[in-house]
Amino acid sequence: MKKLEMFLVIFVIFFILINSVEIMENIRLSFNICINNLFPSLIPFMILSNILINYNFINDLSSILGKFMNKVFKVNKNSSFAFVMSILSGTPSNAKYLNDLYNNNLIDISDIEKCLNFCHFTNPIFILGTIGFSFLHDKKLGLIILISHYLSSIIIGIFNRKSEIITNNNIKSNKVKNNKNFIKILSESIYSTINTLLLILGIITCFLIITCLINKIFNISNDYKFLYGLLELTQGLNFLNVSSLSIKMKTILSSFLVSFGGLCIHAQVFSILDNKKIRYIPYLLSRVFSGIISVIFSFIFLELLY
């Protein structure tokens, strides 16, 4: 297995050397995606979420949403923090929130696995602005994708819950104990956020190089290049935008890609949770079924409104 991996790495190195111009363009694209689309929406939420955890904001939030989270999704009440923050900022920051909660002994592995299934929300600003307004040129279509995406994730969370009620018995404390001052908490939050963002940038770059390699080998038609969205979401949506497909078909396919997330986002999520024994197959299946449910909702809304 190691020899095969070594051979693939050597092959990629030679591919990069032969196609250096195109590879550089893809690397610039990855930086452009991160700097202009991803980082501005992630940075403030990641830093602030870490500060809120250190100031025990979770206690106040769990007292409001704890019963809802426990009854509907059957997860620890402290998971409500990750749920709310994920809705506001999107994925892969959901993995960062869950990782921080676990590291502070506020949730366990079971909670992480279950929350990953339904706390996978694409940033609402990206859906409404980039997809709805810039790509599809219709804010209503962006709103359809957003609602379909959110409903599908919540439905997945309900179907993936277990029969027993999750309590706090396996959690030692629901409070973060520290004597750090604000400057110390802020600097640690910024340091943690920067490390996470650099990890995300590296993974996006790798996946864009992979799509460049695939495109060179198979030379896929422009109308089908949206399939790259199964690997890297933003690039797939870009290709879908310039395809000759109908606006309704673009909306439906966008709904699936947004809810599925792309293997690049999956890799980001599991890289952030690299020291946790999280099963990937349940997560992958939840993304596939979430995409299908999102397509169904989008089709219904399109039929009703257009």
Image (cartoon, helix red, strand yellow):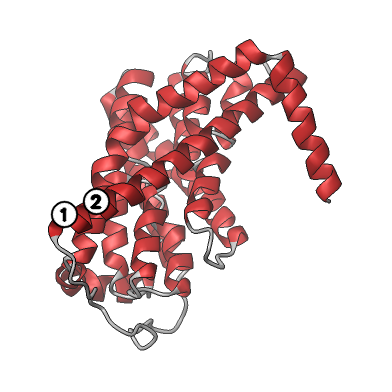
Quadrant of res 73:
bottom left
Assess disc 1: are there few (<14), some (14-19) or many (≥20) residues with their C-alpha within 10 Å of its C-alpha. Answer: few
Q: Is 139 rendered above or below residue 219?
A: below
Quadrant of res 214:
top right
Q: Position of residue 161 (x, y in %)?
A: 45, 72
Query: CB under 8 Å between callouts 1 and 2?
Result: yes
Residue 60 visible within the image: yes
Pointer 1 residue? 183
Q: Is residue 184 left or right of residue 256?
A: left
SS class, disc 1: helix
Label 1 and label 2: CA atoms lie apart by: 6 Å
Locate the C terminus and report the quarter of the image it occupies.
top left
Q: Position of residue 40 (x, y in %)?
A: 28, 33
Q: Residue furthest bottom?
A: 169
* Numbered circle sitting on residue 204: none
Which is nearer the eye, 231 or 285? 231
At x 21% / y 65%, what residue is drawn?
Answer: 54
Instruction: Give the amino acid type for the residue marked by disc 1 in the picture.
Output: Ile
* Numbered circle sitting on residue 187: 2
Q: Is residue 256 left or right of residue 138?
A: right
Q: Position of residue 222 (x, y in %)?
A: 61, 14
Which is nearer the eye, 164 or 193? 193
At x 50% / y 43%, what residue is drawn?
Answer: 265
At x 55% / y 65%, what residue is drawn?
Answer: 278
Residue 127 visible within the image: no
